[in-house]
Image: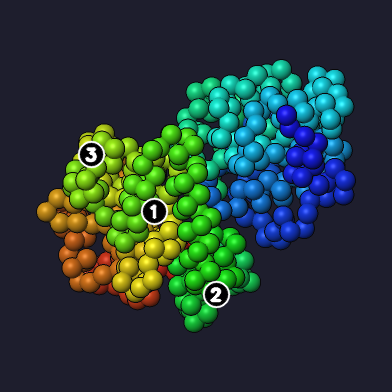
Amino acid sequence: MLSIEDMERFNPWWRTGSVKAEWLKEYKRKPYFEVEKYVEKRQILLIWGLRRVGKTTLLYQIISDILKKADKKNVFYFSFDEIAFDIKDVLEGYQKFILNKTFEGTRERIYLFLDEIQKVSDWENKLKTYYDLYPNVKFFISGSASVALRKRSKESIAGRILDFLVRPLPLEEFLEMNGHDLRKIKENPDLWKREIIPLFYRYIKYGMFPELTAVEDEEFARKYILNNVIDRIIYKDLPEEFEIKDVELLKTLVYILGKNPGMIVNYKAIANDLGRDQRTVANYFEYLEFGLLVKFVFNYRGSPLASARKLKKAYFSTPNIAFAFNQNIERVLPAMLENLVASETDARFFYRNGFEVDFIIAENGKLDAIEVKKTEKDVKQIKKLKEKFAGKVRKAIIVDMEKEGETNDVAIIPAWKFLLGLGGK
């Protein structure tokens, strides 16, 4: 039975009238402003994304806004991350002990915030019932998984829900959180280059997590990512969702990818090397994708269906995950930069057939080609792609760690400018 103490622990504003200062952050990320527009709309709002990217902080910021206009007892927050209660038990306890009436018995708007909702079985149908019965109840839900959250919400509560993805910090927000004025930077980027480049190196290593934006201790940052992101997903989230028996295999697969982000995924070869079943290895990679640790990029073959059957590469959702597994960052930094471009562009394709181009972005019958980091060989690869897909390649660029220029009609753009939308993005 959910106790009053459990509820009060999550909802200190019932006594104080405000959210604890340490739960709020002064900086509001872009997803906050997207969600804010729909606070008074009828639909359930789903906020989803990787662990530790700021979903709960966003919820607290919305709660803080609501408390300025609503009765403090009408705002309820509960996290299912640590306490395994059913939605029905939680909401009945709230009505009985805090509201002292039922949802049906009040005409006031009730705001319900349910964090890590994916931990609850059949959550989508339970919410659907409450949504249909009580028009005065507004739900905000969050979760740290992708496939199940969105799939179940679209299947069971379609038309009743809007979803918002909270990504790891983009460079723009990272710079703002470190006190920089983006408008000034974009007006004259080269004037700020000396200040931005050291920050960019911190960003690619561990600065895509909001709590690490001002941290300079690399060992602390590495432990933070390992303990609060990787281990939580591997040892808690995924085993709870899929009843995984071989948790160490999950850790091994993440470790292998951590040493080589962007590797070609060959399930058979990996299974042979590890002495595991090929199907199990394939399933475990899918679990990692579910947990938002891993994303796949497919070999472009002219259509999504044909591409999905071919080779695929695996990247992390942020290169910061690779940082956590590598003491020698110089060795893996080029692959981390490639991973960063994969994350930032949300690219779905690469090209490999006689020659290779890192990323292909296909849109409306046209292709954008992006090569990362490298040498004169990269220019040749892009030229071959232009010849292969004559008339279809709209834009072709090379993203370098710091260099800038042009060679054989191909623009070379430093990564920090590319991420800020300057020079060819």
Residue drawn at (39%, 53%) of the image: 316
Q: 305 or 251, which lies in front?
A: 251
Distance between mark 1 and mark 2 Cα atoms: 23 Å
- Residues at circles 3 and 1 in contact by the CB criterion of under 8 Å: no
Q: 357 or 47, which lies in front?
A: 47
Residue drawn at (44%, 47%) of the image: 234
Q: Which residue is mark 1?
A: 316
Q: Quadrant of the N terminus?
A: top right
Q: 345 or 124, which lies in front?
A: 124
Q: In the visual, does 213 lie left or right of 61?
A: left
Distance between mark 2 and mark 3 Cα atoms: 41 Å
Does any portion of residue 156 appear in the rendered image? yes
Q: Specify which label sits upstream in the sequence, 1 or 2.
A: 2
Q: In the visual, does 49 lie left or right of 321?
A: right
Q: Secondary structure at mark 3?
A: helix
- The quadrant holding residue 341 is bottom left
Distance between mark 3 and mark 1 Cα atoms: 21 Å
Give the image's coloring scheme: rainbow
Circle count: 3
Q: Specify which label sits upstream in the sequence, 3 or 1.
A: 3
Q: Specify which label sits upstream in the sequence, 2 or 3.
A: 2
Q: In the visual, does 205 lie left or right of 376?
A: right
Q: Quadrant of the C terminus?
A: bottom left
Label drawn at residue 228: none
- Check disc 3 and give the amino acid type: Gln
From this viewpoint, which residue is outermost toward the left? Answer: 354
Label drawn at residue 216: 2
Q: In the visual, does 147 lie left or right of 335?
A: right
Whether 140 is drawn above or below 346: the answer is above
